[in-house]
């Protein structure tokens, strides 16, 4: 597999986002299925494993830490804080909290759940806009100095915020959504990453499953599946996007790969500082995704893809209003 540089390490070019094993997409796989998927990913060459305090309200970190414990020295272990579960009288709830004391607490909790004494790459999961980014990054820098974190990253931030953060402490990576159908990274963040030497980690590279070739109707999904509230999977937006999907699938047939592989291969061809981060709960999908590393796209195919799936042909915003307000980046 191709390689990429991130957080002072060289790793295979496709990582694994572990969220799907406990969080966000309806009925998750069993713990045994999740264990099998993680071990299969490692055996297939994956070395970047990405989790977060939020995923499964800590269960995801516990699973990743337990299953990969004996392989800890061979992997790049990534997690996130600043958006984590908090206990309330009526149960656990997600809270965005970028205050230094919250970040320190989140990190300690993650270290305990992961069963490790240091996290290789620790992200601020969301910037709490009422807390200066300099304060949040200062807390992350303190964790580096304390030896609890090796490098730090940011998620869903603008280029302006990234540069402010980098002035406080080197930012190793930015993790945000990037795929053919979510292209806002191209406005400024991709270039800002290149300018400061940060890696861009592209989550949802297959457009939350939409670029895997099969129709997804958000109105038929359970409430626990976040796509059930995403405008692109609903109503008139969905109808328009299905027409675009058919044209996209035709390109995959012409290339001779699956639609999912085509989406990930497009990212691999875009820039050497991009790492696609697909996630799945199914071993066959995992192996399919990793096969994207063998797909070669010429310039004509890249142009055809970008003319077919772009901000003008994709209908609807990527998030509903509340989630849009939580990210520090341009959206469409």
Image (spheres, rainbow, N blue to C red):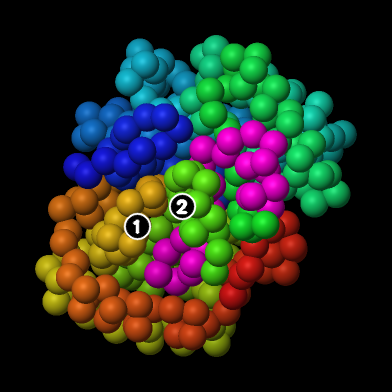
- Magenta residues? 161-186
- The question of residue 174 being in magenta is answered with yes
Residue plotted at (38% across, 61% down):
206
Task: Find disc 2 in the rendering and name its residue.
Answer: 194
User: Judging from the image, what secondary structure is the residue with disc 1 in?
Assistant: loop
Residue plotted at (64% across, 50% down):
163
Residue plotted at (35% across, 83% down):
307
Q: Position of residue 20 (x, y in %)?
A: 46, 45
* Figure disc tally: 2
Q: Is residue 42 visible?
A: yes
Marks 2 and 1, how far apart in space? 9 Å
Q: Position of residue 179 (x, y in %)?
A: 42, 64
Quadrant of the image occupied by residue 140: top right
Would residue 200 appear left or right of 255 to someone viewing this image?
right
Q: Is residue 260 visible?
A: no
Considering only vertical position in the picture, is 97 above or below 119? below
> Label 1 crowding class (10 Å Cα cut-off): few <14, some 14-19, many 20+?
few
Q: Position of residue 141 (x, y in %)?
A: 67, 27
Task: Find disc 1 in the rendering and name its residue.
Answer: 271
Quarter of the C terminus within the rendering:
bottom right
């Amino acid at each position: 597999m191709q390689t990429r540089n991130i957080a002072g390490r060289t790793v295979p070019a496709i990582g694994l986002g572990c969220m799907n094993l406990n969080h966000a997409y309806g009925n998750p796989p069993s713990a045994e299925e999740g264990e099998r998927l993680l071990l299969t990913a490692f055996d297939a060459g994956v070395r970047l494993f990405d989790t977060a305090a939020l995923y499964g309200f800590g269960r995801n970190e516990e699973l990743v830490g337990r299953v990969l414990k004996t392989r800890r020295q061979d992997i790049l272990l990534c997690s996130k804080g600043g958006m984590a579960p908090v206990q309330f009288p009526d149960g656990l709830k997600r809270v965005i909290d970028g205050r230094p004391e919250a970040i320190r607490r989140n990190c300690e909790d993650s270290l305990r759940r992961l069963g490790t004494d240091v996290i290789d790459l620790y992200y601020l999961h969301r910037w709490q806009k009422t807390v200066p980014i300099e304060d949040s990054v200062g807390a992350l820098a303190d964790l580096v100095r304390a030896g609890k974190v090796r490098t730090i990253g940011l998620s869903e931030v603008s280029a302006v915020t990234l540069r402010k953060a980098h002035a406080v402490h080197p930012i190793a990576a930015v993790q945000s959504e990037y795929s053919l159908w979510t292209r806002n990274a191209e406005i400024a963040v991709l270039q800002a990453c290149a300018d400061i030497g940060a890696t861009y980690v592209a989550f949802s590279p297959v457009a939350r499953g939409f670029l895997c070739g099969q129709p997804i109707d958000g109105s038929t999904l359970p409430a626990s599946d976040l796509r059930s509230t995403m405008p692109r999977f609903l109503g008139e937006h969905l109808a328009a996007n299905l027409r675009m999907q058919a044209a996209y699938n035709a390109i995959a047939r012409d290339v001779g790969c699956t639609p999912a592989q085509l989406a990930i291969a497009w990212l691999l061809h875009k820039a050497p500082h991009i790492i696609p981060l697909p996630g799945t709960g199914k071993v066959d999908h995992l192996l399919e995704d990793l096969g994207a590393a063998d797909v070669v796209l010429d310039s004509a195919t890249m142009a055809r893809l970008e003319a077919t799936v772009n901000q003008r042909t994709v209908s609807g915003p990527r998030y509903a209003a509340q989630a849009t307000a939580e990210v520090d980046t341009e959206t469409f």
